[in-house]
Amino acid sequence: MKNKFIIAVGSNINSPEGFKPIENCNKAINELSKFNIKITQKSSWYLSEPIPKSSQPKYYNSVFLCNSNHNVNKVLKIIQIVEQKFGRVRVFKNMPRCIDLDIISFNGNVKNSLLLKIPHPRMHLRKFVLLPLFEIDSHWLHPLLKKNIKFFLEKVKCQKIKKLKID
């Protein structure tokens, strides 16, 4: 499998079927394998405050490394199909969600199109992406900003996040 990429997953509400956030996220992650996306490594689960701050429930987040022969546009399509299958509804920005899958990085490349920006444009500002990513790839380098993950973690110290002791 020639392409290596990083996906972040998160949720802060139950799915329409009643699955709790982590359960729904795990189901979505497992669904990706049906599309020939192989998960090679996954971080722990983290609990974080919503950004921007709001009265929403806290988010459950994880990051995972993947391999696939699919190109980045195909992976985006697959992610959108999986999100829809597991209850994602897009009405307004930063709304609560039962599933959120984001391509964080793809082969260490930069992409800037109307449909997709890689690396994810706000990932370096989000401790809930950085800390799980650091757990599985402590040497990751931002391909656009040319800074390592430790640099960005120093900048988001004030964001509240808690590593959970669950699978």
Image (spheres, rainbow, N blue to C red):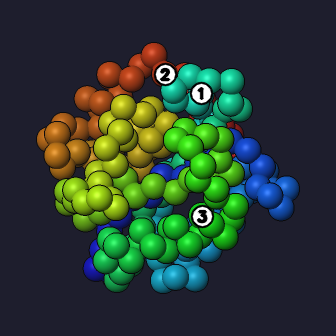
Which residue is rendered at x = 52% and y = 41% of the image? Answer: 93
Q: Which residue is mark 2?
A: 159
Residue 72 — which label?
none
| Residue 115 spot, x, y in % from top left | 34, 61
- Which image quadrant is residue 131 in? top left
Q: Is residue 167 visible?
A: no
Observer-nearest of 103 and 142? 103
Which residue is rendered at x = 45% and y = 73% of the image? Answer: 77
What's the residue type where badge 1 is placed?
Answer: Glu
Residue 124's place in the image compared with 8, above or below, is above
Q: Is residue 6 visible?
A: yes
What's the residue type where badge 2 is placed?
Answer: Gln
Residue 49 — which label?
1
Instruction: Of the two numbered discs 2 and 1 on the same chain, state the one appearing first in sequence.
Output: 1
Q: Are marks 3 and 1 in contact (CB under 8 Å)?
A: no
Q: Which residue is mark 3?
A: 83
| Residue 37 spot, x, y in % from top left | 47, 77
